[in-house]
Amino acid sequence: MRLAHRLALGTAVATAVLIVFGGLVTNTGAALAVPDWPNTFGHNLFLYPWSGMVGGVFYEHSHRLLGATVGLLTLTLAAALWRRGPALRALGLVAVATVIAQGVLGGLRVVLLRDELALVHGPLAQAFFALIATLAYLTSPAAKAPASVDGGLRRLALVGAALIYAQIVLGALLTHAGWLWLHIGGAVAVFAVLPVLTARTRRTGDAVAAPLSRLLLALLGLQLALGTGAYLARFSPLWIPGGQTTMLVLPVAHRLVAGLILSATVVLAVRLHMRSVAKHVEGVRASERAWESERVSASSANEGAGGSERAWGGERVSASSANEGVWGKPKGSPISK
């Protein structure tokens, strides 16, 4: 399991870097800097000369190389999870299917020149990031730590994760279609739910969920600052220190922190859900143990009754033998003849 955990962590870090470069590709307008796919200007993806990686080609080709690296890491991770039980095996296969779909979507975006594909490509990358983060948690020793969590938090965590992912989709619509006010409305909904979730989770004192909720709250504060800065840089006439560099860094960092928030919330929901499942499984096992105990007790009682019958039968035979010894064999018996 240690190897699988390290692979999951490595894949998560590589995915975070990939999301950063994806943001750079989008915000620099370099999405079509390389016009062909899966090749790069006719070269094999891995054989394209480094001397040609300048300007937008640097961002786009680096994004492709990082995507291929994440794909190979995901395949290796799935292989490491294959013998780790049906649940982890299934999640590993889902991760492989997702990373393949993500690569195909990115390529079709270039070949078909369809902006609609970018609306799927970005949010799917964040969902994949959350999945890999979940695998990193499930393969860690923290997943085996005893949980002390209020079961009612599970639904709230699921609602929070759904809201964050919806906000990520609205962020993609803002980037590619300019839907500003929906994204702002989504932010209001997220900030109405997530602080409540983090506060309730901290009060549980759970060894995993409580520290994770504190991290989540810090990420929310950072995201609010980044979102405000990105809004002012893009939609207001105010002067922003750093000029174009700041205008590039703010939305890219905003996108990365969104992925971290989604991943933290999904891991939190998984932690709470695992506690609920564990309690259910323990209840089922307790019922099975009680039923088995009753069955053994009933079997012992039956054996005791059978032993009493056998003892009574033995006493009856002994009494009959004693009578025969006193009175002798009856006349006409085969023995007396």
Image (cartoon, grey):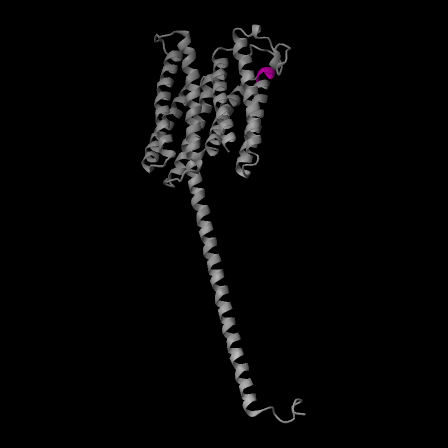
Could you say where residue 32 lies in the image, as x and y percent from the top left? Answer: 56, 12
Q: 140 and 19: which one is in front? A: 140
Total labels drawn: 0
Q: 151 and 307: which one is in front? A: 307
Q: Is residue 98 magenta?
A: no
The image shows residue 72, relative to residue 49, as above or below, that is: below
Whether residue 99 is visible, yes or no, is: yes
Could you say where residue 106 lies in the image, as x and y percent from the top left? Answer: 56, 19
Quadrant for residue 82, please give it. Answer: top right
Q: Main secondary structure of the magenta part?
A: helix
Q: What residue is shown at x 49% (from left), y 57% (from top)?
A: 292
Could you say where residue 257 lies in the image, as x and y percent from the top left? Answer: 41, 21
Q: What residue is shown at x 66% (from left), y 89% (from top)?
A: 335
Q: Is residue 39 left or right of residue 268?
A: right
Which residue sits furthest bottom?
A: 331
Quadrant for residue 194, please give it. Answer: top left
Quadrant for residue 149, please give it. Answer: top left
Whether residue 270 is visible, yes or no, is: no
Q: Is residue 277 left or right of residue 101?
A: left
Bounds of the magenta segment: 109-113
Quadrant location of the C terminus in the rendered image: bottom right
The image shows residue 151, relative to residue 23, as above or below, that is: below
Q: What residue is shown at x 47% (from left), y 21% (from top)?
A: 16
Q: Is residue 218 left or right of residue 123?
A: left
Could you say where residue 230 lies in the image, as x and y percent from the top left? Answer: 39, 15
